Image (tube, rainbow, N blue to C red):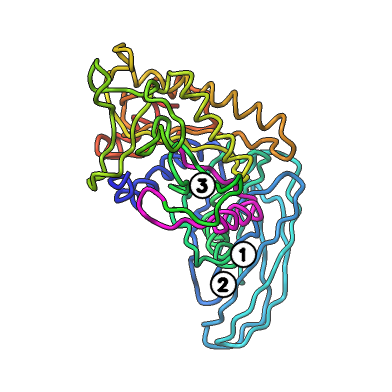
Amino acid sequence: MNYKRSLLTWLIPVAVILLTVALGSQLQRGAHVVQAGSTGDLIERVYTDKARYNPGDTVTITVDIDNQTGSTWNSTLTLNIDHLDTQVYTDTLSLNVANGITTTKTFIWTAPSADFQGYHVEIVAGTTDQNGSAIDVSSDWTQYPRYGYISEFPTGESAADSEAMIKAMAENYHINTVQLYDWMWRHEKFFKRTNGTVDSTWTDLFNRTISWSTIQNQIDSLHDNNMAAMAYAMVYAAREDYEQDSGVNPQWGIYQNMSHSNQLNVDFGDSSTYLWMFNPANTNWQNYIFTEYQDAIETADFDGIHVDQMGQRSDPYDYWSGTVDLDNTFSNFLNNSKEHLSAVAAHTTGKAGQDALTFNIVDGTVDGWAANDVSQNANVDFNYSEIWWLSDTHDDIYDYIRQVR
């Protein structure tokens, strides 16, 4: 995990690109190029008020003006909205702005009734400048996920800070779902509670102070911007002292030897911090950790679970000396997890649709470890991969995407 944290700044953007390549081709937007935050002499930025819209929603399109033309600009702004190569809407607004002055203009558009459609937004200022954005009209974000992440939950982050950060994701990049990475107290016990109440803060695996109110503010802001919040979790991990602190049974573990004296783990080098590994196929472990997944959705209002793993660990042993075909255990785990989460969403007031599930196919390479089992057999809402060094060329990634699809 500390190793993964050091790679996170470049791994997850690559994973976002993979999702965009694999899924974005279905959400065609014609031959237009949309650039985040591109700036000319007049139109500084064009953005929408949400990351995603349901059919029939009201869309607010904002145009930030910064007149650097050298003189007063007095003319007309034109809005063009296209679906593929067909214009579906146009409108105009007058603009009179002195040189060096900033202002904003807004257009209002009603999203059509057709679901799962993408639209290109173009703002034209005569022959002086133009800029653009995009609109996703989809009732279900999992159809076209555009994935971001947050990995800091400090006590000093205000609700306004959270809102500003998340609005930037929505406005500039149309991110419609965000993974909250390493938000939990322990990997097998997500919330630290005192007398049944969630503590205001807790210390995580990396000795960081995590603020419960910051997590809540971030999730609230995500929902306000029509974005989903995914709870990061592990498929098979528990912290040190798991039996005493959480009641997890070592008989659910996976081991390096047949005498169950050497449990698989990740050692963080300080002689006291570990992640111990468990058998995803063990039904007792499944029942335990699924309850934690449920707690994340019910308590924090997450929209689903991002299930992670640590990469290849071939054929360990279970507690009773049996060989565990680890790379073929994940689909069963995920299918049972999806069934559990869907039942929770269906029978819990206010949680309809909050059962999204994805799994990290680590490495992201053709015939990679666990890739075929998950991509062919797992009931997940979308496939996700951290692209490691086994796919370090464009052709490698292309071949992997083709295989997974």
The label on residue 192 is 3
Number of other residues with Cα within 10 Å of mark 2, as a class: few under 14, some 14 to 19, many 20 or more: many
Q: Amino acid at mark 3?
A: Lys
Number of other residues with Cα within 10 Å of mark 3, as a class: few under 14, some 14 to 19, many 20 or more: some
Residue at screen point 52% across, 82% down: 68
Tell me if label 1 and label 2 are in contact, CB under 8 Å: yes
The label on residue 43 is 2
Who comes first in sequence, dot 1 or dot 3? 1
Residue at screen point 31% across, 34% down: 363
Say what secondary structure mark 3 lies in. Answer: loop
Q: Nearer the viewer, residue 296 or 378?
A: 296
The label on residue 123 is 1
* Residue 49 locus on image (x, y percent): 65, 60
Q: Is residue 212 above or below residue 357?
A: below
* Residue 184 locus on image (x, y percent): 47, 46
Q: Amino acid at mark 2?
A: Ile
